[in-house]
Amino acid sequence: MSEMRFGRHRFGDDASLMMAIVNRTPDSFFDQGATWAEDAAFARVAEVVAQGAEIVDIGGIKAAPGVEIGPAEEKARVVDFVARVREHFPEVVISVDTWRAEVGAAVCEAGADLLNDAWGGADPELVDVAASYDVGIVCTHTGGATPRTRPYRVEYDDVMASVLRDTVGYAERALAAGVARESILIDPAHDFGKNTFHSLEVTRRLGEMVETGWPVLVSLSNKDFVGESLGLPVGQRLTGTLAATSVCALAGARVYRVHQVVETRETVDMVASIAGRRAPLRAIRGIQ
Amino acid sequence: MGLPVGVPVALVPGVLALLPEYASIEDPVAELRAAALSAVGGLGPRVLVVASEATGGSGRRVGEALVAAVGAAVVAGAGAGSCAPDPAMPGSQAHDPAQGATGVLVIGNGSATRTEKAPGHLDERAESFDDAVRAALASLDFTGVDASLAAELWADVEAMRVLPEVVSGPGEICYRDAPFGVAYCVARWAAGDGADRSLTERPADG
């Protein structure tokens, strides 16, 4: 596995990172606006940093369709907040969930280290922003979906082939634009441009992404493919999320975008120990 | 096989947690490991390991790993109680590599029945047995250490019976504890002429 760097933050080739979701939105699916107020979002950052999250992923627009949020409003939601987090938590990697180059540039000025382009390069200039600020970028697969649209009768001949072609293509485009190799992540983007069957297949075949050599980010947390698989509403999907997390961890995913930091960290650590990549924390039983 | 004389000697318990393949992120035996490495580090570049065949010979593996960890080499040796030349190996007496040893590492420990959570559960006889082992290390007289009781208490004391033959100088106990229900002792004896084979023990908190 490879080393990773996001801005000035470096991580070794054995690191698995927790990217905690921090929504500056009134309407995101999981928290329903719980951290819409800036102080609530700031408290959420403090909480997840205390829980050991290496990355916070700050988003100003929910992924699902809804009221249109223009660049000015999006910047109003995230830029000053990024600056505040930068000032108070200099040790945490600040990621911003945006597809807009204009927003990307503004948050990088404010101290962001990573641009999480959940919409797969919808704005072709985002890679140039990442390169010029020497920050990281997440290259996702959406199957060509327009930002903030739901998949409708999307089909693939081979969903993983599409994921590999698009994410690796995007990663190579970022590299060519000048983004550092160790600052590029690829993400299959579960449920983005994918139905539940697609997301399950991508999970099952995640090892094919790992084999590309690009570090893999997975965003599984409480998503609909978990809910539909188990027949559970948002709020009851943690067990299913952790099961999917285990499969991705065993395959070699490196970054986990999560709502529940502590539970995911325990899951990923346990899998890493099973896989023989991480020693037990403290084992003495039977060997004393 | 003959035993080298006039060389430093160390005693270390055959704790599997000391092996690299059983390493944890947080070392559960950090204090024991430090004492063991320090003691083995004083045995010079060629170390004879004397261990029993208890628990599948794991004690020997622990000893050899400690020797490797301090950058020394293991010289060919034999198990406890087999210090005589091996008749199955012609010439083993004439070309005894143990005579080139610069130090002797003895592997052994007291009972494994010190507490209710000990590997062999609590045995009320364990503490007095371990006291007898401690006394034998000081007197270098193991006649008071009962072999059948040792087996009942899951102790590994057979290799210690070579200590009266190999110890030639003064010694000290560097670590003695039973943190996981097993009685550990790390001791080291300097090379000497046999005149002073006394044993001292550092204060427990020191």
Image: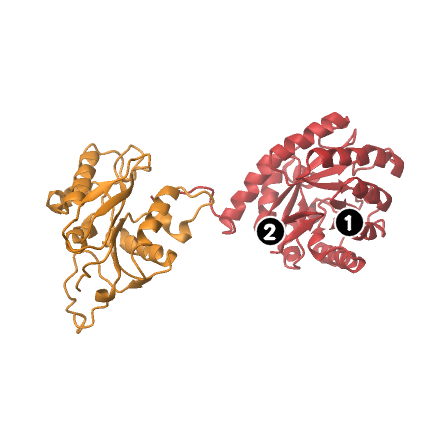
Q: Chain of mark 2?
A: A
Residue A234 visible in the snapshot: no
Would you say B69 lies left or right of A84 here? left
Q: Is residue B3 above or below residue B93?
A: above
Q: Chain of mark 1?
A: A
Corner quadrant of residue A226: top right
Residue A287 position within the rendered picture, expressed as x and y whole percent measured from the top left: 35, 45
- Residue on which the image places disc 2: A12
Colour orange, chain: B
Corner quadrant of residue A181: bottom right
As helix, strand or loop, the secondary structure at mark 1 comes to loop
- Residue on which the image places disc 1: A142
Q: Residue at x 64, y 55 (%)?
A: A210
As helix, strand or loop, the secondary structure at mark 2 comes to loop
Front residue (pair B187, B14): B187
Position of the N terminus of chain A by quadrant: bottom right
Q: Which label sits on residue B55? A: none
Q: How many marks?
A: 2
Q: Residue at x 67, y 56 (%)?
A: A214
